[in-house]
Amino acid sequence: MSLLEYNEIKERKYIIYEKEPYEVLTSHVFRKQQRKPVNATKLKNLISGSVKEISFHVSEKVEEAEIDSRDAKFLYSNRGEFWFSDPADPTKRYAMKEELVGPQGKFLKPNTILQILSFQDRHVGFKLPIKVELKVTEAADAVKGNTVQGGTKTVTLETGATVNVPMFINQGEIIRVNTETGDYVERVN
């Protein structure tokens, strides 16, 4: 395993801090007055899901976590559990708790292929595609002149998630959504 200098701890890196794996959510290297530079980071614990703000100084080094990833097929969610299987062998099934899946779980639809992340043979999360295409199941009609909310309305998608979209989106259309931010990107059809 390699060691990372304080300024190499950047977004989307996985590190081991206090003997547990963390994902770096944000990092900002700055110098306060005449002092040495500091990297102020926000870290997410991959096991518990908690988020911490930690500052790394010039003299500090951290171990980079070895996170393994493999393909998995999302099957369904039930009672706070998300069920997955091996894409090549559907009989090999396993579940992940809703807390571990996080807010991105609302964009999962059955038969979606994604990357399961594991640390020391323990599932710690997954990577969805950045953009997914979902069908609009409920959409209110656009009201002429209703631009007080900035010309947007809230629609419900086939997975049950709600997203703000432009007024011209109607029920039955397929839209592209950014899974990291939960924002509407574009209409597909």
Image: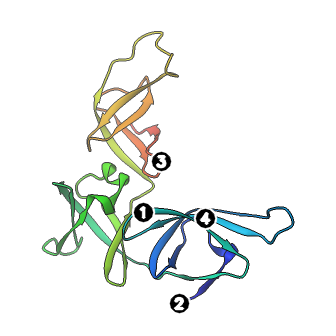
Which badge, 3 or 4, comes first in the chain's sequence? 4
Q: Nearer the viewer, mark 2 or mark 4?
A: 4
Q: Disc 3 to disc 4, how far (Cα)?
A: 19 Å
Q: Nearer the viewer, mark 2 or mark 1?
A: 1
* Disc 2 target residue: 1
The residue under the point 16% across, 54% down is 79
Badge 2 marks a residue whose secondary structure is: loop
Q: Is residue 135 placed above or below 80 in the rendered structure?
A: above
Q: Is residue 82 left or right of residue 3?
A: left
Residue 181, numbered label: 3
Classify 10 Å Cα crowding around label 2: few (below 14), some (14-19), many (20 and above).
Answer: few
Residue 41, numbered label: 4
Classify 10 Å Cα crowding around label 1: few (below 14), some (14-19), many (20 and above).
Answer: few
Classify 10 Å Cα crowding around label 4: few (below 14), some (14-19), many (20 and above).
Answer: many
Which badge, 1 or 4, comes first in the chain's sequence? 4
Which badge, 2 or 1, comes first in the chain's sequence? 2
Q: Nearer the viewer, residue 125 or 145?
A: 125
